[in-house]
Amino acid sequence: MKIGFVGCGAIGSCYASYLTKNHEVCVMDTSVPVIEAVRKNGILVDNCVPGVGNGETVSVRPAMATTDPKEIGVVDLLVVFVHYQYLEAAVRNALPMIDSHTMILCLQNGLGNYDEIAKVVPEEQIIIGNTAFGATPVAPGHVKHTGVGVTNMGSLKAPMEKVQQIAAGLRSSGLEVTVHENVMNTIWHKLVANVAINGMSALLETKNGFVDANPYAHEAARLLVEEAIQVANACGCTLDHDAELEHAYEVSRNTDETISSMVQDVQHHRETEIRIITGAVCRLGREHGIPTPCNDLLLQLVLAKQSLYLGR
């Protein structure tokens, strides 16, 4: 397959490094320093996955790295790793890479990414899901790979045959991929762990492992997760309370050294994705008449924190 990446950040770089094994991979990013670094050195990945990685840095060279989507042209699969607030604009900018056969894959955290992509391309071309990968940036074009796991995929309107074809292509490069008929259940499963970890770690500026290891953060995570599970099940999911709570703690332990993307946003004075993670629980809770006081408070605290540097 010819695969295009929109966004060459931490997770995008890890996926691109895998997929170059069997596919023609082209990366597009609006950041000139990132593209210049990739052109010069390739994508540099520090293999630091606990129990697997040896800490060595490998260089993977994509077929093309550019800031101009016209240079890449039409691709079979477009993988989008761009923050929610920039998604619509990013996909519009990438239209030279998309035609009627191109499938768009979004594995971003949160609820709301699908709707942003659907403003630009037909829903029949959108595949959504999530990933257990963890990564943190080191420098432009250089990332530390800190967690590995299943890539979950499914669709709301895209033909499942297409989803299975894309999944097979990803598996051929060594990725573990599971296709789900009820992909929203899977997305909420990941979202619940994000609700436990991301907002609190952003507020405290800690690594993921702090949430499970610290007794106060551990209890706060329980309160956040219990609200999220109630909302998810009101939305049609079938999440088990005990299993989801333990999964959230397990993610914290398994990604102990990972600095979440939301912490990275705070540290780099960028707008966070709190609105589509914790904020999604609050919004959907209101729609279904379910109180979410803990998530409401955390949402406002993170928004207050980012307002200090955004000035709004």
Image (cartoon, rainbow, N blue to C red):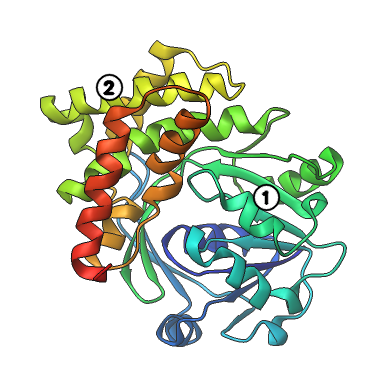
Which disc, if any, is residue 54?
none
**Number of residues whose C-alpha sits closer than 10 Å to that of mark 2, classed few (under 14), some (14–19) or many (20 or more):** some
Quadrant in the picture for residue 41:
bottom left
Compared with 33, 84 (above or below) is: above
Taking the spot 62% from the left edge, 65% from the top edge, the residue there is 20
Tell me the SS state at disc 1. helix
Q: CA distance from mark 1 to mark 2?
A: 35 Å
The residue indicated by pointer 2 is: 222
Residue at point 31% right, 36% down? 296
Q: Is residue 257 visible in this depiction of the protein? A: no
Please give left or right for residue 69 compared with residue 218 in the image. right
Q: Amino acid at mark 1?
A: Leu
- Say if 31 sits above or below 259 in the image: below
Quarter of the figure with residue 308: bottom left
| Quarter that holds the C terminus | bottom left
Q: Which numbered disc, 1 or 2, marks the residue closer to the eye?
A: 2
Task: Note whether residue 158 is visible.
Answer: yes
Q: Where residue 290 sits: x, y (%)?
A: 43, 22
- Name the N-terminal-most of marks 1 and 2: 1
